[in-house]
Image: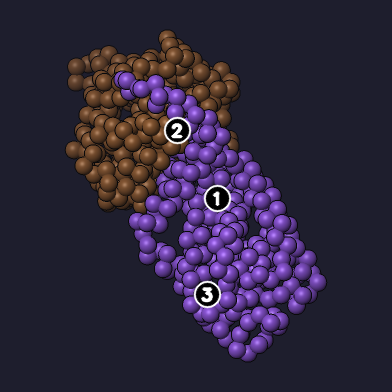
Amino acid sequence: MSEEPAAEGGTAPAVEISGLRYAFGARAAVDGIDLRVAAGEVFGLLGPNGAGKTTTIRLIVTLLPCPPGSVRVFGLDAARERMAVRRCVGYVPQQLSADGALTGRQNVALFARLYGVPRAEREERVARSLSAMGLEEAADRLAGTYSGGMMRRLELAQALINRPRLLVLDEPTIGLDPMARAVVWERIGALRAETGMTVLVTTHYMDEAEQHCDRVALMSLGRIRALGVPAELTAGLGPEASLEDVFRACAGDSLSFLDAAGGDARDIRSTRRTASRLG
Amino acid sequence: MTSEAPAARRAGSAERIRWRLGVGPVWALCLVELQKVRHDRTELLTRAIQPALWLLVFGVTFTRIHAIPTGDLPYLDYLAPGILAQSALFIAIFYGIQIIWERDAGVLAKLLVTPAPRVALVTGKAFAAGVRAVIQGVVILALSAVLGVSLTANPLRIGATLVVLVLGAGFFSCLSIVIAGLVLSRERVMGIGQALTMPLFFASNALYPVALMPAWLQAVNRVNPLGYEVDALRGLLLGTPAHLALDVMVLLVALAVGVTVAAALLPRLTR
Ligand SMILES: Nc1ncnc2c1ncn2[C@@H]1O[C@H](COP(=O)(O)OP(=O)(O)O)[C@@H](O)[C@H]1O
Ligand SMILES: [Mg+2]
């Protein structure tokens, strides 16, 4: 994976969002956010269930319609240049979405074909993607036999097949045990070091974000409440402070992090489903 | 990748064009279907049970009691193409449930963020249903031959039979995806699918000649793509008089409309 990035939008920020809103019916899931993710950084979008992280991400990856000019990916307008945006983005949704009835290799090859990877390169690129995620041994086993962490890494391999300049990961470590979480982060780190690709990741594990993200945005109720380098954000609150304290401080102290924004049945259900599929 | 040979690049550009036309994604989704069938063959068997029962119980019995006048043709022979079409219908009409499942599992979102055109994705799904229908169809044809149905031995006609089966399954899978795109829930797709299959099946020439039907049912049969599918299958397999050109035209147009509408509704599922 040592591909130089595509020519378009060479110096533009990886993601640029301005005044973005999105409502499901009357309820604003994203309520006016501005955000800029520089090319090459690992950026964490943090917040409790229902904060609007997934909605924001779905707007960025062109799954939801947005007004022209409100979302740009490497300078490309997510409303007007959807195909071009899709070509430079790799996306791993919150659910475990690899197909258990196919082998790991078949799962990745499917996306190689969907992204139009030329046949002459396909086999090799599929193999590279798999090995970049440490799955070469398991590649020819049915994905249904994988552990949760392996499944996640398989999805990363799928998202990498197109050599995206921006990798978008929605809760990549949700439902995984600490070991598997560490491995997933390790692979993301190695990938970033090797390719310089931009990573936009959502999580509600504050400790992970603190450890692995260059910058974070804390979200609740559809708005960004704080934004910056984790160490700088916590420094303002004293030496012992964590991102969770930052969150409490900026989202209003009545709002404990874990139950902020009220429950979100859809999200909890899909999380449960993910967890149960992990067995 | 660090060094690409120029030849590989050139080959790549021709492929890219083909891919842009949408052949790549369509083939990719069919291939995945074949791979799944290979990994789990039990499903092939369980799905063969129902058509086998129709042929064995219904077909053999009604052949004996001559309850349905089918001219010189033994009733079992008359029935076999109908059951072929029925099994393709049953496979296809629940494809919408698979789409809903794929939505819930995040698979659909991943498909929709690839640069593959929606129409190619839906066509791929439709042909994937066709792949299943063909595999099932081969099993049913073999069974029919064993039961003594005098099927054509002409490989071209068999080939054309399978093509018709793909078109029929493709259309009904699109219909199912359209339903899924409208009602958005698994239960409702299931309910509507069930409510739809029996009328589609009984208001067609699958079980009995159109001439035996009351006029209003004949009218229904005339707008029912399943009727055209059965007509073509019967003509191809048994050599009975059929309107092959019209049948194929109707199926092609139905499929094209189905793909277009389903592709337009697909993004609704991931909102
Ligand atoms: N498809 C949808 N239909 C209706 N409401 C939705 C839908 N998706 C999300 N929401 C609502 O939007 C809000 C933000 O959800 P989401 O972006 O999934 O948050 P997060 O990913 O931070 O947990 C929640 O209140 C949720 O209930
Ligand atoms: Mg979410």
Name the kind of residue labelled 1 in the image.
Ala
Q: CA distance from mark 3 to mark 1?
A: 26 Å
> In the image, residue A238 lies at what x, y percent?
22, 16
* Chain B image colour: purple
Residue B144 badge: 3
Which amino acid lies under the numbered mark 3 shown in the image of this protein?
Ser
| Label 1 crowd (10 A; few <14 / some 14-19 / many >=20) | many
- Please identify the residue farthest to the top as the structure is shown: A11
Q: Quadrant of residue A153?
A: top left
- In-image side of B252 versus A47 (left or right): right
Q: Amino acid at mark 2?
A: Tyr
Q: Secondary structure at mark 3?
A: helix
| Mark in the foreground, 3 or 1 | 3
Q: What chain does badge 3 belong to?
A: B
Residue closest to the eye, A254 or B22: B22
What is the spatial separation of the Cα atoms under label 3 and label 2, in whole angstroms? Answer: 42 Å
Say what secondary structure mark 2 lies in: loop
Q: Chain ID for label 2?
A: A
Task: Please indicate, yes or no, whether residue A218 appears anywhere in the rendered image.
Answer: no
Real-space Cα distance between discs 1 and 2? 20 Å
The residue under the point 23% across, 21% down is A241
| Hue used for the chain lettered A | brown
Q: Which residue is mark 1?
A: B126
Q: Do circles 3 and 1 both sit on a common chain?
A: yes
Residue at which label 2 appears:
A115
Mark 1 residue CB less than 8 A from any atom of ligand 1? no
Q: Could you say where residue A219 lies in the image, as x and y percent from the top left?
A: 40, 26
Up/down of A152 relative to B84, above or below: above
Queried on whether the Cβ of the residue with tag 3 lies below 8 angstroms from ligand 1, the answer reads: no
Q: Say whether residue A132 is left or right of residue B250.
A: left
